């Protein structure tokens, strides 16, 4: 096994709260510069930039197609998928459960679809910052049906996490892993490897380029691929992961 550094929660310019600078090629360049071997693009309730992100990544870095769903309970769930097609298919269901973009929300931020060169090729007309109508359980099941990993996002944050919204960690929802956000050199609030029996990952939740890699996960795997990531998160075949 080898050790690889991964940042599995990065927003692109498709998320209204992310900066326009978060284009596929700029994210790849910054991630490579920071020494990361794997990234995941997780826009709010959308996966429309995942294919261009993978095209921009080429062989420079492994780019996983993801999405950060907001459930009806206002819980953020990160879904990581085997490919952009499966991410986009899951995102279609989420999109059907979102309200249209209001005039007020348009002022909050743009929702830019970009190609691999970072050129704007369209905009999203649903309100990605809104909660979807999907429950937590429906969201996890949707991710699983698309062969994805369902990760409880930033559980140590005081908002939009399972802990903040439910007051406890639901044991029977079917999460594959738990994500924490750690400030540099901070000690994890619970062990760095397991929480309620699940693997723990640490991700940056970047909305700006400079935030990429500010916290990360170490993967002990044969190579930085989605299949190996799944095995590391499930602790299969000697693969493992822990907070960097
Ligand atoms: Zn979030
Ligand atoms: Zn996020």
Image: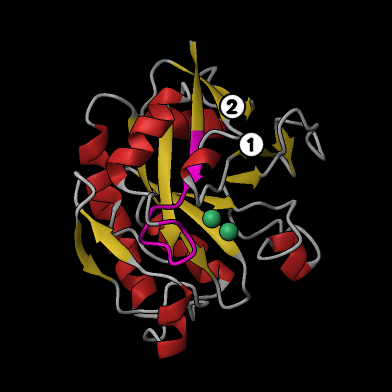
Q: Which residues are magenta?
A: 7-19
Q: Residue at x 65, y 51 (%)?
A: 154
Residue topped by disc 2? 241
Observer able to see residue 63: no
Q: Main secondary structure of the magenta part?
A: loop
Residue 165 lies left or right of residue 205; in this view the side is right
* Residue 168 vertical placement versus 218 (above, below): below
Q: Position of residue 127 (x, y in %)?
A: 41, 78
Q: Nearer the viewer, residue 135 or 189?
A: 189
Label 1 crowding class (10 Å Cα cut-off): few <14, some 14-19, many 20+?
A: many
Q: Residue at x 62, y 37 (%)?
A: 202
Q: Position of residue 118 (x, y in %)?
A: 23, 48
Q: Position of residue 119 (x, y in %)?
A: 19, 53
Q: Are marks 1 and 2 in contact (CB under 8 Å)?
A: yes
Residue topped by disc 1? 199
Label 2 crowding class (10 Å Cα cut-off): few <14, some 14-19, many 20+?
A: many
Secondary-structure class at tag 1: strand
């Amino acid at each position: 096994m080898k050790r690889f550094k991964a940042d599995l929660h990065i927003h692109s310019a498709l998320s209204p709260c992310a900066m326009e600078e978060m284009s596929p090629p700029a994210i790849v360049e910054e991630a490579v510069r920071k020494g990361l071997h794997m990234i995941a693009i997780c826009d709010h309730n959308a996966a429309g930039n995942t294919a261009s992100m993978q095209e921009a990544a080429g062989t420079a870095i492994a780019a996983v197609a993801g999405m950060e769903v907001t459930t009806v309970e206002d819980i953020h769930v990160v879904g990581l998928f085997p490919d952009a097609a499966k991410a986009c298919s899951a995102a279609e269901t989420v999109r059907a459960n979102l309200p249209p973009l209001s005039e007020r929300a348009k002022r909050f931020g743009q929702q830019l679809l970009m190609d691999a060169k970072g050129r704007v090729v369209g905009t999203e007309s649903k309100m990605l910052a809104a909660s979807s109508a999907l429950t937590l359980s429906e969201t996890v099941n949707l991710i699983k049906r698309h062969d994805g990993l369902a990760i409880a996002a930033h559980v140590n944050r005081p908002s939009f996490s399972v802990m903040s919204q439910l007051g406890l960690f639901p044991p029977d929802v079917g999460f594959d892993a738990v994500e924490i956000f750690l400030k540099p050199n901070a000690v994890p609030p619970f062990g760095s490897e397991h929480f309620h029996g699940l693997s723990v990952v640490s991700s940056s939740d970047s909305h700006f380029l400079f935030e990429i890699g500010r916290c990360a996960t170490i993967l002990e795997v044969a190579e930085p691929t989605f299949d190996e990531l799944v095995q590391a998160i499930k602790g299969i075949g000697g693969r493992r992961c822990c907070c960097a």
